[in-house]
Image (cartoon, rainbow, N blue to C red):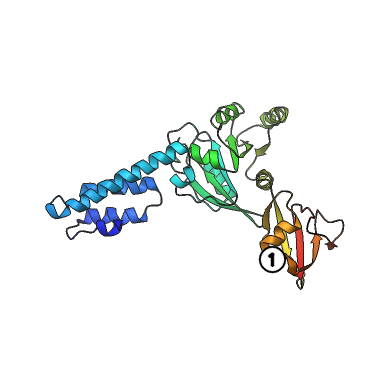
Amino acid sequence: MFKRCMASTNQSPQYLKAQSMFFQAKNNEEKLHWLEEMMKECPRHKSSEKMLANLKTRYIKLKEKIEKIKKSGKSSAKSGIKKEEMQAVIVGFTNSGKSSLLSALTNASPEISPYEFKTKQPIVGITDYLGTKIQIIEVPAFGSEYYDKGLANSADVILILVTEISQIKEIESGLEKSVGKRLVVFNSFGKSQEEIRKTEATLKSKKYDFVILDINRNLNELKEKLFRGFGKIRVFTKEPTHKTPSDRPMILEKDSTVKDIAKKILKNLSVLKETRIWGPSSKFAGQIVGLQHVLKDMDTIEFKTR
């Protein structure tokens, strides 16, 4: 309906460009901008009055929608970001190394710059850790006008990236509504061994869950702590006729049972004949277990059906 209302026989090249950019917009803010451009370029004559009125109505409704989302803090919708099963955000002050960390962890290629407040929109990347996909988002600098509080509040895990210990409390003061587990990531770039030693001792004494990060040395340590922050377990499945398990695990809640995963795989539990387990929760390889057996991270499970 809206697309037809924007059509006109007297469209200028500028209007057509704005209309094209509107339909390609990735989020509501971009759509609002291009609606403004369309209203500016809309022909001013009798036959275009209805089209201009429709544009203005659309503009008002979209602006109200954006304001409503801002007030509710539902930032994922505002930013046009679909929340994946496991989502983490990187929160830190400007020039703390957020873009470098996102680039090292994921498939994203943010612009890395020494200038302040370079990141003005959330940047999304995906990291693969032992067959597990984790969505990681760099939000604009904490304390800047572009900072996305809603995303930080709704994420499952918050990576608090700092270059000084004093920054932790400042950032935590802005996370009062966040529901995710917090993991402090201390960027050790440019720090002396003595500074790193003192920082580690302080973080331990304050009982923070933390990683002293050297991007070239211990990214896997950060990935492992990040995954554990979600409170999930990875369980691989195996076909009775195959020697090796699946490449990618199923992601389950901690303390899930054989019954929980069986419900996800089998349509009818009555067809289940036998279940075998390999891994941390088994007493020995290929142990036969019942439906109430509690699974552990990195288990492998095999179902035999009738």
- Left or right: where does residue 3 sit relative to residue 124? left
Direction right: furthest residue: 284
- Left or right: where does residue 1 sit relative to residue 245? left
Compared with 55, 302 (above or below) is below
- Left or right: where does residue 158 sit relative to residue 58? right
Question: In the picture, residue 270 is in which quadrant?
Answer: bottom right
- From this viewpoint, is residue 247 visible? no
**In the foreground, 270 or 135:** 270
Compared with 74, 135 (above or below) is below
**In the foreground, 65 or 11:** 65
Q: Give the residue at mark 1.
A: 266
Q: Which residue is at 59% across, 32% downward?
A: 163
Q: Quadrant of the N terminus?
A: bottom left
Residue 292 location, x and y as percent? 79, 55
Q: Which residue is at 55% across, 44% downward?
A: 100
Residue 259 location, x and y as percent? 74, 58
Could you tell me which secondary element the residue under label 1 belongs to? loop
- From this viewpoint, is residue 156 visible? yes
Q: Which residue is at 63% across, 32% downward?
A: 191
Compared with 267, 96 (above or below) is above
Residue 302 location, x and y as percent? 76, 65
Question: In the picture, residue 235 is in which quadrant?
Answer: bottom right
At label 1, the amino acid type is Leu
